């Protein structure tokens, strides 16, 4: 879909229409309370609900959240299993509320390593919310930007080999059609919580022109007020997409 249209948010300038969030800091949040890391992930899941709910008020039409990366399998077996169980619980528990709130849910990432029960719930949630046209919530699960580009390139190459695509016609509009995000606009604003200033393989292609906010708040402490402030900041930025201001 490419660079997104600005939204019609309140104030003098439009706020971001698509916000993508790297939800970091759950482990440190739990550690600070003397609790296991999974306690922080559960607190993080509660925060997801509040942030999804505030999107319509902020004019955020697309929200994309990084729930589990292709690198997160390197964590302990206990943490990985706990996170997978949390995702299953979250989907089952939130299914009706998300459908009723007119949220359309999509998942991006490679499903091959996910268990069958989780994949089934993901399919159900996508299917049950497919007719909704409110907030578009995209959950990145077993997602890595490089992995996504590699998988897209493989499919593109298969189309070339099958004679469906002329290699001479491949340009920068072609590859995004093969990405997991092909129906989404590019993010306008990428937020990372917890004080780390890196993008950790998130939406690499799609964020070429995004604005970034690296904030110190740990994800379980992130609030709708803080997201509102970041949306206001975004509206004050001068976005030129490589052009010169006239
Ligand atoms: C990073 O914090 C967070 C994750 C790897 C998991 C993100 C998951 C959630 C917020 C849970 C719920 C999500 C959904 C969609 C239900 P970290 O563990 O790396 O924290 P640390 O850097 O402090 O150790």
Image (cartoon, grey):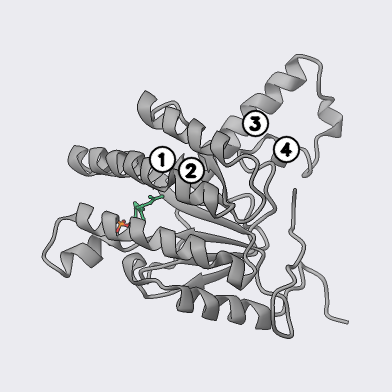
- Residue 178, located in which quarter of the rendered image? top right
Q: CA distance from mark 3 to mark 2?
A: 14 Å
Q: CA distance from mark 1 to mark 2?
A: 5 Å
Q: CA distance from mark 2 to mark 4?
A: 17 Å
Give the mark, 3 or 2, whose residue is nearer the N terminus.
2
Number of marks in the image? 4
Which residue occupies 37% across, 75% down? 216
Mark 4 near mark 3, Cβ–Cβ under 8 Å?
no
Vertical order, 23 against 169 (above or below):
below
Q: Secondary structure at mark 4?
A: helix
Residue farthest to the left?
A: 34
Mark 1 near mark 2, Cβ–Cβ under 8 Å?
yes
Please name which of the two marks, 4 or 3, marks the residue nearer to the observer: 4
In the image, 19 versus 59, the foreground residue is 59
Q: CA distance from mark 1 to mark 4?
A: 21 Å
Q: Would residue 2 appear left or right of 152 to someone viewing this image? A: right
Which residue occupies 28% across, 39% down? 85
- Residue 56, located in which quarter of the rendered image? bottom right
Q: CA distance from mark 1 to mark 3?
A: 18 Å
- Residue on which disc 2 sits: 144
Give the mark, 1 or 4, whose residue is nearer the N terminus.
1
- Residue on which disc 3 sits: 153
Give the mark, 1 or 2, whose residue is nearer the N terminus.
1
Q: Would residue 110 appear left or right of 31 to someone viewing this image? A: right
Give residue 177's mark: 4
Report ligand 1 position as a quadrant: bottom left
Which residue occupies 31% across, 39% down? 84
The spot of residue 138 in percent (x, y) is: 54, 48
Give the mark, 1 or 3, whose residue is nearer the N terminus.
1
The spot of residue 21 in percent (x, y) is: 49, 60
């Amino acid at each position: 879909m490419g660079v997104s249209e600005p939204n019609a948010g309140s104030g003098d300038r439009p706020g971001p229409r698509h916000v993508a969030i790297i939800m970091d800091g759950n482990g440190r949040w739990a550690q600070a309370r003397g609790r296991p890391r999974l306690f922080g992930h559960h607190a993080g899941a509660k925060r997801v609900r509040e942030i999804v709910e505030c999107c319509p008020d902020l004019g955020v039409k697309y929200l994309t959240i990084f729930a589990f990366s292709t690198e997160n399998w390197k964590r302990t077996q206990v943490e990985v299993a706990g996170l997978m169980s949390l995702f299953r619980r979250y989907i089952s528990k939130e299914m009706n509320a998300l459908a009723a709130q007119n949220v359309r849910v999509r998942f991006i990432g490679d499903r091959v390593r996910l268990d069958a029960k989780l994949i089934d719930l993901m399919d159900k949630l996508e299917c049950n919310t497919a007719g909704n046209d409110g907030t578009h919530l995209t959950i990145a699960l077993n997602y890595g930007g490089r992995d996504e580009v590699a998988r897209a390139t493989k499919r593109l190459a298969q189309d070339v080999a099958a004679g469906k695509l002329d290699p001479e016609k491949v340009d920068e509009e072609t590859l995004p059609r093969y990405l997991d995000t092909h129906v989404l606009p590019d993010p306008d604003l990428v937020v990372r919580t917890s004080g780390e200033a890196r993008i950790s393989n998130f939406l690499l292609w799609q964020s070429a022109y995004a604005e970034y906010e690296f904030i110190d708040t740990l994800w379980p402490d992130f609030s709708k007020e803080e997201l509102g402030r970041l949306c206001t900041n975004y509206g004050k930025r001068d976005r030129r997409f490589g052009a010169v201001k006239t």
